Image (cartoon, rainbow, N blue to C red):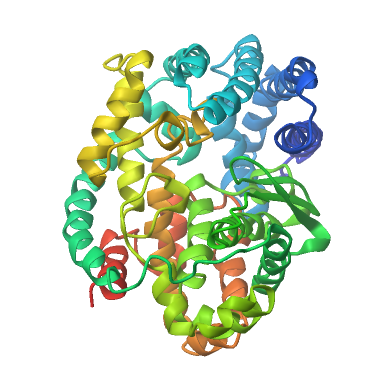
Amino acid sequence: MSSPDFSAYGHLHARAREIALLNSTAALLYWDQQTFMPTKALDFRAEQLSYFNGKAHAMFTAPEVGDWISACEDAGLADGPDVEMGTNVRGWRRHYARATRLPTELVERNERAKIHANAAWEKARDASDFSAFAPHLKTVFGLTRQMADLWGYEASPYDALLEGFEPGARAAELAALFDVLRPAVGGLLGPAVERSARVPADLLAGHYPAAAQQAFNAEVAAAIGFDFEAGGIATTTHPFCSGVAPGDCRLTTRYDEENFLVSLYGVMHEAGHGMYEQGLPPGAYGTPAGTAVSLGIHESQSRLWENQVGRGREFWEHWLPRAAHYFPHLTRRTPEELFAAVNRVRPSFIRVEADQVTYDLHIILRFGLERRILDGELAIRDVPAAWNEEFEKSLGLKVSDDAHGCLQDIHWSEGLIGYFPTYTLGNLNAAQLFRRALADRPALPGELAAGRYGGLLGWLREKVHQQGERFLPGKLIEQATGEPTRVEYYLEGLREKFTQ
C-alpha cells in the first residue's frame, strides 16, 4: 500500500499561515482603532480592515483550497493517527463549507459597515442618543440577516449566526435552557438580595486613583498567569481581549475612581481570555489546532477567573493586603468583608458590572431582542422601548437613558449578533470546569488561598487550551469534565454562595 500524499496538506498549511498574517495584521489595526487611532483616520481604517478581511476570505475560499481539503480527506488524514493533522483537516473543511457561502464583496461591505457602526456607537453612547446609532444598527442587522440566509439554516436564522460562535448550538435549545434558568435565577434573586442587604452599599467607598488600579490589576493579572512579556493592558470604552499573534495578546479595561472593582474584574475577565490565547499551541497558530474552539469555551475561561477565582473567599484572603497597599483605606477591612462586598447582589443596569445572580438575566434579554429583530418582529427604531420594557420585567428597574440601556454593549456595532448566549454557556462551563478541577486537585483551595494559581492554570492548559479545535465545544467539556454541560452545577454554585 502506498503512503498518502501529504503535498495537499502542505499547501493548506502554507495557505493558512499566510492568511494568519493577514488576520493578525487586521487584529492589530482593530486594537489600535479601539485605543489610540485618531478620529480622522476612521474612513481609511475601514478601507484597511475591509481589504485585509476580504483578502483573507478570498484566499481561503479559492477553489484550490477545496481541492486540497478533499485530497487530504481522500488520503485519510482527517481521521488518521496524527492528531494535529486530523484536527486541521476537519476544521478546515468545516470553516471552508461556511466561508464559501459568502461572496468576498459582502465580507468587505460588512467590514466597512462595522467600522463605521462602531465609531457611531461610541459617540451615541457618550451622548446617550440611540437615534444617532440606529441607521448603522439597521445596516449591521440587515447585512447579518443576509449572511445568515446565505449560510443557511433549518429552523431559525439565529442558528446560522450561532454556528459561527458556538458550533452545534441552536436557538431552540438555548431558549429551552433559558426557560429553565430564568425562573431558577428569579427564585434565587429575592433571598440573595435580602442576604446582601446586610452588606452596606458604601462598605468600599473611597477614592481609587486610576494609576494605583493599573498597578494592582497588573500585579493580579501576572500572578494568575497572564504573561506580560507577551501582552499588555490599555484603556477603552468597553473591555476586550485581542489575541493578535503568538507572543502578542492585548487586553483592555476601563476605570472608575470610585470603584476599583470595575477595572479589577474587567482585567481578570479579559486576562482569562488572554491566558486561553497564550495557552494555545504557538506552533499551530493560524490553523484549527492552534485556534480556540468557540466563544462559549472562551467565555468559560474569562468567567472562571473572574468569578470562581476572583470573587472567591480565598482570593481576598490573599489579596487584601496588596489591595490595601495600593488603596490604604482598605486596611480597616477584613477578607470576609471584601468577599461579601464583591458578591453583593442587587439588580443593576450595566451587564459587565452585574453580579453573578443577575448576570444571566441580562443575557436572556439580549438573546430575545436579537431573535425578534432578525425575525422581523422588532423594528430597529423600537429597540430602546423594547429593551426598557423587558429590562423592567426581568430586573425590576426603569432604564433612565440609552447609555444605561441598549447602548451599553459594543457587540451589535461589531456585528457580533448571536454572541451574547455564549456568556451564559461560559458561566455553565466555568462552574463545571472549576468543579472538576477541585475534584482532580484537592489541594486547589489551599493553593488559591496562598495566591498560587499555577496548578489551576496548568489544569486548564491541559484540558482546554492545548486542545485547540480538536473537539467541538460540547465534546471538549465532556472530555474535560467527564460529562456534558449541566445547568445544575451552575445553579448549585449560586445557591451555595448566595443563599446559604
Q: Nearer the viewer, residue 57 or 234?
A: 234
In percent of the image, x 46 and y 88: which residue is there?
442
Q: Is residue 360 left or right of residue 30?
A: left
Q: Is residue 249 left or right of residue 470?
A: right
Q: Is residue 238 left or right of residue 156?
A: right
Residue 438 horizontal/vertical position (percent): 44, 80
Q: Quadrant of residue 378?
A: top left
128 over 86 or under it: above or below: above
Q: Is residue 376 left or right of residue 235?
A: left
Residue 382 horizontal/vertical position (percent): 32, 17
Residue 81 horizontal/vertical position (percent): 62, 56
Q: Quadrant of the C terminus?
A: bottom left
In percent of the image, x 46 and y 53: which residue is there?
353
Q: Nearer the viewer, residue 222 or 460?
A: 222
333 over 395 or under it: above or below: below
Number of labels in the image equals 0
In percent of the image, x 39 and y 66: which residue is there?
431
In percent of the image, x 35 and y 22: which residue is there?
383
Residue 334 horizontal/vertical position (percent): 48, 85
Q: Nearer the viewer, residue 382 or 109?
A: 382
109 over 178 or under it: above or below: above
Camera sees residue 414 = no
Camera sees residue 443 = yes
